[in-house]
Amino acid sequence: MRAARMHAYNEPLVLEDVPIPEIEPNEVLVKVGAAGMCRTDVQLIDGYFRPYVESIFPMTLGHEIAGEVHKIGSLVPKSAGLEEGDQVVVVGGWGDETCRHCHEGNTQICPHGKWPGFGPYGGYAEYVPVPAQYLIKVDKRYKLKAEELAPLTDAGLTPYRGIKKLRDAGALGPDRVLAVFGVGGLGTYAIQYAKLLGGGATVVAFGRNAEKLAAAEDLGADYVIDIKGKSLDDIRKELTRATGKGEIDAVIDCAGAKEMIQLGFGLLSVGAHYSSVGLVGDRIDIPLFPFVAREYTYHGSFWGNYNDLAEVVKLVQEGKVKHTVKAIRLDDVNETLDLLRSGGIVGRAVVKY
Ligand SMILES: [Zn+2]
């Protein structure tokens, strides 16, 4: 099969022919229909995760995977309901299934977990072995395309979980302002979930790219604010003009740049909640006294679990989520990674097979 594999840090992926993977009895071989391209892939190549995780090369990237069931392992239970040819999406965080987090269903934060696209197998190859319990079947009647489904497994999942945390903490409602920071791959979904789960909250998208902000408005943001080159005071004034108040009650941060987090905390109302899902920067530097005295809550939110993704797939099947997808060929993967690095992709780039 064709694969694009990482052999070293800071080098382009190598396009090569490799054997089709064997499966374990509890696994399913998925024929990849499409694989979403994530900024995390760029960060992986650039060494962002190097201090935290040991990488073994060659590594097949691509952790946003949709495809078809190609072959089913002998011990996959019938109750899984999987048949060859079924359309599926892959849940990204595979747990050891022994720890408390796994038992709570949060396999994506299992301390002994692993992820497709961060090891030998991933979506930048034509086939990938997946433990059967990490597949979600998609109803074929809805005729969804693989390139629409693949990004749901991270870009369309991660902000969903992040916004659920805000909702479950009581941070959303009709009298609240919910800000979406960053209007890239994750942000385009975050805006839609902000409207779907916000309980009537006013949704304001903050970004630095006019084209992406226009897309955010099309996706349902009540207001968009271009923060490029503006001071905190300017932005507060613009926010006041838009919403009637110069404060934000909740943030879903799909970017995570240090300055943007500082801006966000500078705009928070008393008792506000901030949910971080984006990883553009690698440090948080915010003043402590207001954090304590104004009772802010900071949520880290990582990827999503099986049930989160099943809910996202349901919303998509019901036609409640729009896709902003650009399909590319596997052969163009390195050029597209460069575009991602420079912020030149609107929506999600997806490798289509
Ligand atoms: Zn576990």
Image (spheres, rainbow, N blue to C red):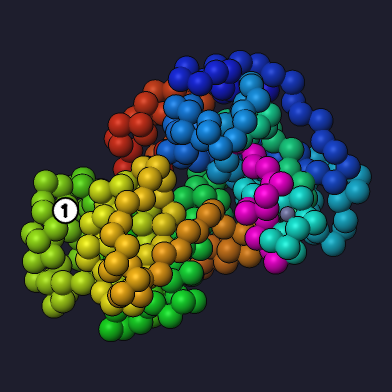
Q: Is residue 28 above or below residue 120?
A: below
Residue 327 vs residue 107: left or right? Answer: left
Q: Is residue 300 above or below residue 258?
A: below
- In magenta stretch: residue 108: yes
Is residue 49 or residue 65 the one in the foreground?
49
* Quarter of the picture holding the N terminus: top right
Q: Is residue 196 above or below residue 8?
A: below
Identity of the amino acid at label 1? Asp
Residue 62 vs residue 261: left or right? Answer: right
Is residue 110 or residue 160 the one in the foreground?
110
Is residue 288 or residue 136 the one in the foreground?
288
Residue located beneath label 1 in the image: 226
Name the residue rendered at 57%, 57% in the picture.
304
Q: Is mark 1 within 8 Å of ligand 1?
A: no
Q: Position of residue 66 (x, y in %)?
A: 60, 45
Q: Which residues are magenta?
A: 104-117
Query: Magenta part mainly helix, strand or loop?
Result: loop
* Quarter of the picture holding the C terminus: top right
Is residue 242 or residue 333 the one in the foreground?
242
Q: Is residue 18 visible?
A: yes
